[in-house]
Amino acid sequence: MWPLQGGCPDACAAALGCDEHATEAVAEAVGLADAGRGDEADNLLAGQWDGESAWRLKRVGDRVRTMGGADDALSIWFHQRSRLLGLAQDHHVAFRYDASIPQLQMQLEGIAIDVTKGKKFFTKGSRRADLVEPTQLVSIESGLAALQALYGQDVVTTQIEGSHSRHGVAHGRELAYDTRVEFSEGLVCDGRVR
């Protein structure tokens, strides 16, 4: 589930892009989550990447493309990451979440490793990237760090739960990962790790 509980609408709105429509959707989703209707909240936020809001898909790739800045080596890598995210977005538009989600997770891990000099998004312990930056709204404890904990959970038995675990997806332990909500959450993370 999106990091809504505990009153984190600002981080979610920042992740979606802070336009008026996204802010209204996040506020509505927070109300749904607070009312115990988390699935409806998730679907509402996932819908922010569909239809008239599909322009947000390209914006994530554009953000990633610029992450290398003046560093020529990083710039080449982030251009390639942006290209691969474009392929994931094509899969999303075609409702092929089974293909888009692993691609999002691979790029998220790679971005985290590149920007933290070797730390990882999905791991635990001393090799885990510290994504809490108090000056960046999206990275506050209840934002990216909450998603990092959720995606970093172990899945020790095969299941059909729709868990967010990268471990479950990568190792074939989660068999219900291929959803619109999962794609949307992964895309937000890819566009916000810096």
Image (cartoon, rainbow, N blue to C red):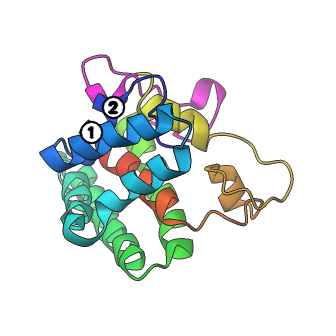
Q: Report the predominant secondary structure element of the magenta stretch.
A: loop
Amino acid type at circle 1 is: Ala
User: Would you say residue 119 is visible in this rendering?
Assistant: no
Of all residues, the one furthest to the top in this rendering is 134
* Residue bearing the label numbered 1: 13
* Residue bearing the label numbered 2: 9
**Residue 29, above or below 129:** below
Query: Which element type, helix, strand or loop, lies under badge 1?
Result: helix
**Residue 54, above or below 133:** below
Of all residues, the one furthest to the front in this rendering is 35
**Is residue 37 rendered magenta in the image?**
no
**Is residue 127 rendered magenta in the image?**
yes
Q: Quadrant of residue 82?
A: bottom left
Is 68 or 102 nearer to us in this picture? 102
Direction from residue 110 to residue 194 in the image, left or right? left
Is 69 or 18 nearer to us in this picture? 18
Residue at horizontal 62%, vertical 52%?
166
Q: Could you tell me residue 122's position as x and y percent?
A: 58, 42
User: Would you say residue 192 is visible in this rendering?
Assistant: yes
**Residue 126, above or below 65:** above
Q: Report the span colored magenta.
A: 117-140
Residue at horizontal 27%, vertical 64%?
57
Q: Quadrant of residue 138?
A: top left
Q: Quadrant of residue 137?
A: top left
Amino acid type at circle 2 is: Pro
Task: Tell me the quarter of the image containing the C terminus.
Answer: top left
Disc 1 and disc 2 in contact, CB within 8 angstroms: yes
Q: Could you tell me residue 144's position as x and y percent?
A: 42, 34
Q: Could you tell me residue 3's position as x and y percent?
A: 46, 35
